[in-house]
Structure formats: C-alpha cells, structure tokens
Image (spheres, rainbow, N blue to C red):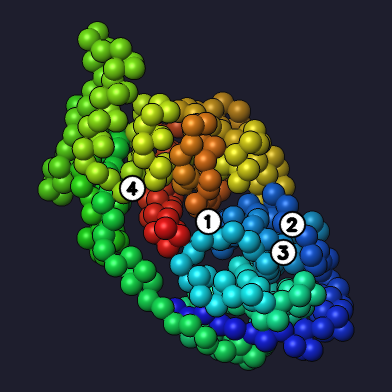
C-alpha cells in the first residue's frame, strides 16, 4: 500500500474548480461541491463501495454528483479525527489535508465525472489553506497510475498492512448461539488475521458455538446464569471476573444474548458487537436514511430482524460497532444495507444476513486493528 501526495498549486485554483463544475453540469449532473454528505448519500456509499467509507466521509466534507436526486459519484475531503495508522506520518503534518474516500458508479467511470470530482475536492482543500493533499492507502497499481496521471500525485510513504499489527491481539469471543460469525473469524485467523483466539465464553451450555471452539482447539468458558441460585448482579460480577482472568485486549460479541452491565463495559473498553440492522452513524438517532432515500427505524435490540419484518421495512442490514452503555448506539466501524425481498420470513432473511455478517465482522476487526 502507498500514500500519495498532491501539491495543491495553481492547477487546483478557483478557475480549475469552476471549470470542473461546468463539466459536471454539461454532463447532466447536479453537484453539491462542499457540504456534509446527507444520510442517503452515506447509505449509498456503504451499499456501493464499502462499509467503512460512510463514517470517513461523515468525518469531513464531500463533493457529491447526483442525477434525479440519486447520488452517482462522490469525493470526500478534509476528514478530521480518523485514527488509521497510515495517517500518522505525512497525514499529520501541518499543511496536509486528507483526500478521500472517492468513488463513482461503474457506468460513469472513464468519463469526465471522476476527474471533475477529484479536481473540485482538491481545490476545496486548497481554499481551506492546505498546501498538500494526502491520498491515503492506495493499493492497486492502476489506481496509483490514475492519480499520477490526473493530478500529479507522487508516492511519499509505503507500508505493509500486515506489519501494522506486529503480534496477534489477545481476543475473547462471546457467543450464545450457533457461532457462525465465530467460525468466520476462526477461518480468517487461520488465513492470517492477527488475532490470538484465547477463549470462547458462552452462556448457553448447549450452544453449537462451543462445538466450533472445540473443533478449533480453542478454550471454552461456559458461564450460564443459574437464575434460581444467582441474582443478576452476582452473575454479572462473576462474568467480569471470569473474562478478566483471560486478560483480553479485544472482546468480540458475536451473537452474545445477555445485556452487559456497566461494570463489564467499563472493565473492557475494546468491545465490538455485530448487530443485524443498518444503524445510523449518529447513535442518538432513532431513524436511518437508506440508499433509495427512504427512512426506516434504527432497529436496535435483540429482535431487530423480527421488528424489521413486523414493520414491513423494505431494508435491513448489518452494523459492526463499538459497545457503549446504550445498547446498539456505539461508534460504527462498518455497516452495509440489505434489501428485504418479497416473501422473506425471519429464517430466509437471517440466512442472507449471516453471509453479510461474516464479511463485515472481519472488516470491522480489521478497521479496529488499523486504528488501535
């Protein structure tokens, strides 16, 4: 992977920006040249380009090209507060602004739209007083060549993603059910995901997740709540002690069906949960916009799938997020929407969501690793 640098000279002055805006207009697009991306655009970005990109765009500004109200291309710029390891060198230097993420619908690639969006975003960085723009974490050689050709970018930093995590992170998985997400993590760890799976903690003695752990030679910790013998407070205190003894650096909640108390959340700040709904980036919101412009409830809680079906929602999705005291309101690592199909019941929808969960839990863990 490489970081590219663009000198924000007169090639990106006000005249260049105006000419690029005219190009977009002549091609029949409307353009929002310097704004916070709206909820529909952010959801569309997650659907089309990647589940981490919306939060990156939301951390800054964006140039968005639309036709008939639907977004077709975007270029993010001037994101603040991102914690990726590759932004700690040139990206932290005074006078350097961050460009990206950047994406255009496939049918409009190769035309004027992408280059025009790129030019406008770089011009906006120049207007904001930056002398240089960093184009971070570029991988494919063809994309490197594109930036070299269109804006004179040059390579300033090279890095190996795998080298960013020099040792495996001690990880405890907590699950209550079949553990299909746990299995996805096991398989990716075998392929090199830098986690040390210390143990599986499970509160259901018959859960199939325990069998998956045994098959992978992972220690198990069976922690049922014996309600006739233990108060809720006593069980929660026992849970904290049992997990703390494993000294985890990271805890993955992969279908854990017991609400964690304040003491647990405060004891383990690195908690990641996977939730079967498309949650808003703003955890205070009760609704979330979708790629088609519709607005649906943020289906939080243990019955998100059933609630979505009962509400006849046209959309659901998956979100991987940090855990806070308020359920399903922690910071989003990755998310992706999924359409509800005609005839879907809870079983069929859950089956399709599982495939998406398996992808996103790995993407969420990778983002956490890159930001730690």
- Percent coordinates x, y for residue 175 in the rendering: 30, 36
Choose the circle earlier in sequence order: 2 or 1: 2
* Label 2: few (<14), some (14–19) or many (≥20) C-alpha neighbours in 10 Å: some
Is mark 3 in CB contact (under 8 Å) with mark 4? no
Choose the circle earlier in sequence order: 3 or 4: 3
Choose the circle earlier in sequence order: 3 or 1: 1
- Percent coordinates x, y for residue 265 in the rendering: 41, 34
Q: In the figure, residue 194 lies in which quadrant?
A: bottom left
Give the numbered dot on residue 51. 1
Please say if 316 is above or below 125.
above
Secondary structure state at the residue bearing disc 2: loop
Gap between marks 2 and 3, in whole Å?
6 Å
Apparent side of residue 238 relative to residue 308 in the rendered image (left or right): left
Q: Nearer the viewer, mark 3 or mark 4?
A: 4
* Label 4: few (<14), some (14–19) or many (≥20) C-alpha neighbours in 10 Å: many
Q: In the figure, residue 107 lies in which quadrant?
A: bottom right
Gap between marks 2 and 1, in whole Å?
18 Å
Residue lying furthest front: 94
Give the numbered dot on residue 20. none
- Residue that carries the numbered disc 3 in the rendered image: 62
Is mark 2 in CB contact (under 8 Å) with mark 3? yes
- Residue that carries the numbered disc 2 in the rendered image: 36
- Percent coordinates x, y for residue 18 in the rendering: 87, 79
Give the camera-side residue of 192 and 29: 192
- Residue that carries the numbered disc 4 in the rendered image: 250
Please say if 96 is above or below 371.
below
């Amino acid at each position: 992977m490489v970081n590219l640098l663009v000198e924000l000279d007169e090639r990106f002055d006000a005249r260049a920006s105006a000419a690029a805006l005219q190009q977009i207009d002549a091609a029949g697009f409307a353009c929002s040249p310097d704004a916070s991306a709206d909820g529909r655009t952010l959801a569309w970005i997650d659907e089309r380009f990647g589940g981490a990109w919306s939060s990156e765009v939301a951390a800054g500004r964006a140039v968005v090209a639309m036709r008939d109200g639907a977004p077709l291309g975007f270029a993010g710029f001037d994101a603040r507060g991102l914690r990726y390891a590759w932004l700690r060198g040139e990206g932290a230097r005074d006078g350097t602004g961050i460009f990206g993420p950047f994406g255009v619908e496939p049918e409009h690639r190769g035309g004027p739209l992408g280059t025009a969006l790129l030019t406008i975003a770089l011009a906006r960085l120049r207007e904001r007083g930056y002398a240089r723009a960093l184009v971070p974490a570029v991988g494919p050689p063809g994309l490197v060549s594109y930036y070299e050709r269109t804006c004179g970018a040059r390579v300033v930093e090279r890095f190996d993603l795998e080298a960013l995590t020099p040792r495996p992170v001690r990880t405890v998985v907590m699950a209550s059910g079949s553990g299909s997400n746990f299995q996805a993590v096991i398989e990716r760890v075998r392929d090199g995901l830098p986690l040390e799976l210390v143990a599986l903690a499970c509160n259901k003695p018959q859960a199939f997740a325990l069998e998956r752990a045994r098959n992978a030679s992972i220690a198990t910790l069976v922690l049922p709540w014996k309600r006739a013998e233990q108060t809720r407070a006593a069980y929660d205190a026992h849970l904290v002690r049992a997990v703390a003894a494993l000294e985890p650096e990271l805890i993955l909640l992969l279908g854990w069906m017991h609400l964690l108390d304040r003491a647990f959340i405060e004891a383990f700040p690195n908690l990641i949960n996977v939730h079967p709904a498309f949650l808003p980036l703003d955890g205070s919101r009760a609704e979330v916009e979708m790629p088609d412009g519709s607005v649906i409830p943020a289906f939080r809680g243990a019955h998100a799938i059933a609630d979505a079906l009962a509400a006849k929602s046209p959309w659901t999705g998956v979100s991987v997020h940090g855990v806070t005291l308020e359920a399903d309101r922690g910071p989003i690592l990755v998310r992706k929407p999924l359409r509800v199909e005609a005839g879907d019941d809870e079983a069929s929808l859950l089956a399709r969501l599982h495939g998406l969960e398996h992808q996103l839990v790995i993407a969420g863990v990778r983002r956490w690793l890159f930001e730690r």
